[in-house]
Image (spheres, grey):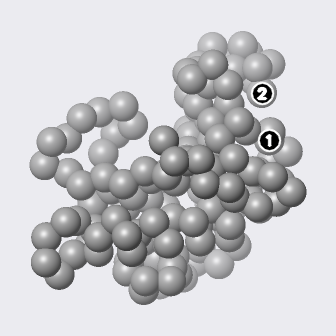
């Protein structure tokens, strides 16, 4: 990965997400345990933490803390599910060895590294061991 970073001169690389099988679902929504609408926004290879972190960024417009919204306690189950069914195969297919996999939900599209005080965002970090996501709790 460092050869790729050195060659490109980037510390964060945005990858295409079109490789995911089944992404041709209606409106590109991904199935999650809660049933909420979740769409993959992008995948980033980020070496800014000093090691490779693969970030899977999703738009989940129904998340929030107010009544009737999908709360963190529900969304965390969806994030763990997406780590297992999307991140693990992605990392294997691309022969990556990340220190962490981060799954993030945002209620609206936000550029990576940008701040948006009105947005709701949830994040979870995992390490991969034997093709399983182990919660790291940042």
Helix, strand or loop at disc 1? Answer: loop
Indicate left or right for 132 with 10 as reference.
right
Question: Residue at the spot x=42%, y=86% of the render?
Answer: 35
Q: Nearer the viewer, residue 32 or 72?
A: 72
Measure the C-alpha gap from mark 2 to mark 1: 8 Å
Does residue 15 appear in this view? Answer: no
Question: Residue 82 at what x, y percent from top left?
Answer: 58, 67
Can residue 75 be seen here? The reply is yes
Figure quadrant of residue 2: top right
User: Residue 133 at what x, y percent from top left?
Assistant: 69, 58
Residue 90 percent coordinates (x, y): 73, 56
Residue tagged by mark 1? 96
Establish if 101 lies above or below 75: above
Given residues 105 and 18, the one toward you in this image is: 105
Residue in the picture at 49% in, 52% down: 124
Q: Earlier in the sequence, mark 2 or mark 1?
A: 2
Q: Residues within 10 Å of mark 1 (few under 14, many from 20)?
A: some
Helix, strand or loop under label 2: loop
103 is higher (above) or lower (below) than 13: below
**Residue highlighted by disc 2:** 1
32 to the left or right of 114: right
How many numbered markers are drawn?
2
- Which quarter of the figure has residue 55? top right
Q: Nearer the viewer, residue 26 or 101?
A: 101
Q: Which mark is residue 125?
A: none
Near-viewer residue (41 or 120): 120
- Contact flag, marks 2 and 1 (Cβ < 8 Å): yes
């Amino acid at each position: 990965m460092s050869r790729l970073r050195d060659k490109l001169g980037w510390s964060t690389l945005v990858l295409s997400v079109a490789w995911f099988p089944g992404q041709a679902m209606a409106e590109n929504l991904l199935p999650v345990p809660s049933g909420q609408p979740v769409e993959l926004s992008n995948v980033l290879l980020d070496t800014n933490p000093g090691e490779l972190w693969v970030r899977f960024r999703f738009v989940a417009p129904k998340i929030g803390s107010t009544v009737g919204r999908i709360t963190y306690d529900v969304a965390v189950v969806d994030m763990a599910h997406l780590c297992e069914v999307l991140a693990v195969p992605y990392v294997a297919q691309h022969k990556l060895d990340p220190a962490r996999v981060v799954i993030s939900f945002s209620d609206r599209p936000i550029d990576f590294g940008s701040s948006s005080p009105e947005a709701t965002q949830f994040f979870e970090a995992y390490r991969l061991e034997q093709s399983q996501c182990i919660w790291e709790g940042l």
